[in-house]
Amino acid sequence: SVGVAPYEVLYGRPCRSSLCWAKPEEHVTLRLELIEETIEKIKDIQERLKEIQSSQKSYADPKRREVEFDTGDSVFLKVTPRRGVTRFRVKGKLALRYIGPFEITERIGLVAYHLNLLAQLGHMHNVFHVSILKKHMLDPSHVVQYVHVPIQEDVSYEEQPIRLLA
C-alpha cells in the first residue's frame, strides 16, 4: 500500500538479496543528494499513508453508530465464544452469544454503563462498554408460553404426546 518494501522505508535503500551483493570494498558515503532523496521518499510515504487512512475511514464510518442507553433500560450482554471454553454450561456452536436482559442502573462517562447483574454472575465486573451491549426490545410474539409440567416428588414426570402424526 505504501509502494515500497518495508526494508526500503526503514533503511532508505533496497534490500540486498543473494543475487546482488555489493563488494565489501564499495563503501557508500552519505551525500547531500541521498539525504534529500530520503526526505522526499519519507514525505511521499506519509502522503500515501494519509490517502490510505482516509479511504479506510470512508469504509468504516458508515458502519459506525452512536449508541446511548438511558437508566432503567434493559440490555443484553454480549458473551464472546471461545474455542474450548465452557461458559454458562454450553460449549461450541450452541454457546450463548448474548445473556440477559439486565437493567442499566447508571451511566459512567460517555461509553460505559453499570448493569444490575444476577447473583449468579457476582464474580463478573458490572461495568461494561457500550459496544458489548444490545438493547432489549420486548416483542410479545417472540415469547414462548410456559407450559406447566407436574413434577412428582422423585423429580420425574409423565410424558404425553401432543398429537399423532399420520
Image: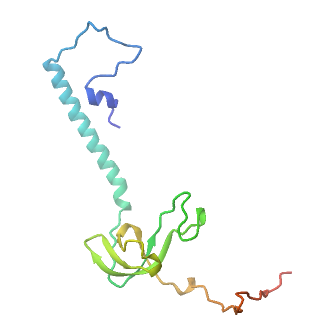
Decide which of 69, 52 is in the foreground and name it: 69
Q: Position of residue 81 (x, y in %)?
A: 51, 62
- The quadrant of the picture occupied by the C terminus is bottom right
Give me the residue at 31% from left, 8% from top: 23
**Is 164 located above or below residue 113 in the figure?**
below
**Is 113 located above or below residue 53 in the figure?**
below
Decide which of 132, 66 is in the foreground and name it: 132
Give me the residue at 54% from left, 61% from top: 85
Determine the image quadrant of residue 1. Answer: top left
Q: Position of residue 18 (x, y in %)?
A: 41, 15
Kindly give the residue lying farthest to the front in the view shown: 154
Q: Where is residue 2 in the image (x, y as percent from the top left)?
A: 32, 36
Decide which of 68, 94 is in the foreground and name it: 94
Relative to 10, 97 lies left or right: right
Q: What is the tally of numbered marks visible in this picture?
A: 0
Q: Position of residue 147 (x, y in %)?
A: 66, 90
Kindly give the residue lying farthest to the left in the view shown: 32
**Is 130 located above or below residue 8 in the figure?**
below
Relative to 58, 79 lies left or right: right
Determine the image quadrant of residue 140. Answer: bottom right
